[in-house]
Image (spheres, coloured by chain):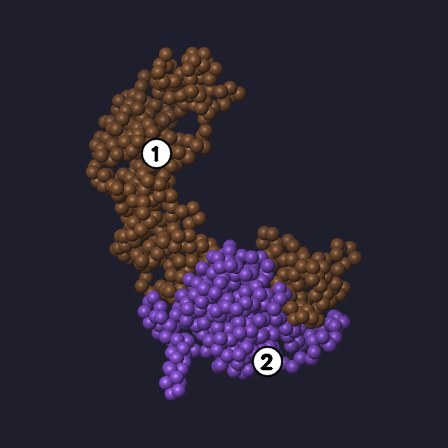
Chain colours: A purple, B brown
Amino acid sequence: MDTARTTLSALRQRIAALETTARPAPPGGALSPRATARASRIALDRDAVDAALGGGLARGALHEIHAASGADTMAASGFSLALALAAAPPGRPIVWVRQDYAAHEGGDLHADGLQALGLDPSALILVQLRDALAVLRAGGEAARCGALGAVIIEPWGEPKALDLTTQRRFSLAAEASGVTVLLLRPGARPMPGGAETRWLVRSEPAAPLAMNAPGHPTFDLTLLRHRHGPPGGPWRLEWNRDEKLFKRPALLRDPAALPRIEPAPKPAERAPFRLAG
Amino acid sequence: MPAEAPLLIVEKAKGALALAAPDPAALRQGLCPGLTLAEARARIANLVVAEHDPAADEALVERIADWCDRYTPLVARHGERGLMLDITGAAHLFQGEAALLEDLLTRLAGFGLTAHGAIAGAPATARALARGRDRVIVPPGREAEAVRPLPITALGLDAARVQALRRAGLKIVADLIDRPRAPLAARFGADCVERLERLAGIAEHPISPRRPVPAALAERIFFQPIAHQDDIAATLARLAADVASLLEARGEGGRHFEASFYRVDGAVRRIEVATARPNRAPKAIARLFHEKLDALSDPLDVGFGFDLIRLGAFRTEPFLAAQSSLEGHALDDEAVADLVDRLGARFGPERVQGFLREDTHIPERRARRVPVFAMSGNPALWQDELEPGDPPLRPLSLFDPPEPIEAMGEVPDGPPLSFRWRRVLHQVTRAEGPERIAPEWWRAGGDWPDRDYFRVEDRNGGRFWLYREGFYAADRPQPRWFLHGLFA
């Protein structure tokens, strides 16, 4: 009886050790100091989401992001970029590996728009490739580079090459280098895989600004899977680019009950437009 | 009747087939270029005729020129059929000039080609001597002497002046060389004198090589051709080390490397890699080539093996221990630069891009996506123009070209109430605008109508960037609506 218990606890300890640190050392030797220094957690909202994740999103791990529908693809991209920004230490570039088809479907990344979410466009290296296989290869290569802030890998659809082994390889690379790897999956259904967390993103009406103007990027997030805890959500969060944090948006009436757009005010009453450009 | 049938290359001239290039057997039997095929057939019954293919000739000469790179990097085309090799400082690698010429002509003969060659201290001299007589090697400083017995056609003048010279009794170069230059120039043109001086090696006339000359070059010659992948990789690694030490001696790093593989049968294959920063780490260079070779869609055709592999650094830049000029740039970190190089080598440099700011307010021209390799110096910084707390005013993605939509808008300048994009109807619940963006009429192609942009959100929380081109007015066509981008 007693021996059984000690065996069990010994096994548990071994599993715990395996799951945290005791990976086989990467080819370059033990974990680099850079990797260990960054083996921390990323604060997303300092609130419910962080609590559900056990203190924040794991750094140096693979996270998978799905769009709830085709119309939510850009929300998923925005959410991935927000995660990358939250994860990237200052001054480190972000690599975004994209399949040509993703740009064809959803448009090219726009530098001003990247900046509007908080990314300095000169800190982005965009690798745009023809097919999913190349995207996965380049993504794997980037995930191994510890000098990066974060890597976004965006293949289109459900390529055969993106199997459990590939996901596992990304995870290991992320762990060894300490770089957070975000696998963005436009046009794919969520399936079991090797990621640390899996998210379902839906775009959500934003809390309106003055003059009924559209507000900040707002997402409806569901944590579909979390390797070290129960799934969670949905949460309704908006991205604050100044603090690089997700915030709970201002209270909003039921969007369906909102009046249609108000009749255009007469030119004389119109408030001055926002200064832009 | 001779045993071998003369081979004639014919081409169409003035509606008839004429001889372009008779072979030696045909020449012996009195057939000369320009003769019509019908007449040639009348004279000799047994003929082999082939059509002239200038493109194939050209390609062959180019291939031979490529192959000649093995002797010296300075190879120039000369006329239609001539090649000029600058072998200064290269002859000793082949045990002397005579041996080099012998090797070159023997190998060309091995390919089934007839070639004549000569070596001299001036290009024009060598060229003139290469015609006709075989394997002349002019000792340094004896050019004028060597060309004396040549006919004046060696000057390469036009037919009228050749005839004029002949009429004046000047038949060989020796007749001209001893004369005072001024009357010659007055009578036959200044270029006649210039050509004469070039021919005699008096005037300098550099050749213009057809390919850039590498700043640093290393090569391995194999007496036993190598064909195994591992051998090739090992050779590249050793060559990279050689080139790196050459670059180190110059205090430079290379940004563009090229490996040339010379196959035994004369084919040459070149592989290029580029780096984002000056590089001279042998391992990194060898690895880039490894990536590139691995990713080739048409792999290196080894054939019967390579007997020469060469590695050159073509673009070099000063190599600074700390690359301070790139400060504030995404490539600060050596590891990042390495990654960019590897991705560029594998997938093509143009696929690894960064955003370069342009001084314009036209959304689609705001940023130029350029290969990270091409970015250098201090690119224009991106200034954050948004106030804290502002929502994004520009979309995360932009469609190029903008996608036409059907929109129901408030006349004359309100936002759309609903719009249909990619067959889906979107009910607009919130909108902001218009923000007018006018074309830059002072630039080329800037003559499109004004655009009024709106940021809108639909019932499901999709955020879009739409614009109306033109205005609603009685005497104008209906304005058109476009979707230009998507917000997160």
Crowding at mark 2 (Cα within 10 Å: few <14, some 14-19, many 20+): some
Q: CA distance from mark 2 to mark 1?
A: 75 Å
Percent x, y of residue B289: 36, 53
Residue on which the image places disc 1:
B83
Look at the numbered disc 1 and give the secondary structure of its residue.
Answer: strand
Kindly give the residue lying farthest to the right in the view shown: B474
- Say which chain tag 1 marks: B
Query: Which residue is more in the foreground, B3 or A152?
Result: B3
Q: Nearer the viewer, residue A138 or B359?
A: A138
Q: Amino acid at mark 2?
A: Arg
Q: Are marks 2 and 1 on the same chain?
A: no
In-front residue for pair B316/A43: A43
Tell which residue pokes out farthest to the bottom in this image: A2
- For disc 2, the marked residue is A248
Label 1 neighbourhood size at 10 Å, few (<14), some (14-19), many (20+)? Answer: some
Residue A207's image quarter?
Answer: bottom right
> Where does the image place residue A215, in percent across and percent down from the top left?
63, 74
Query: What residue sits 38% from the left and 61% below the top?
Result: B338
Q: Is residue B308 left or right of residue B26?
A: left
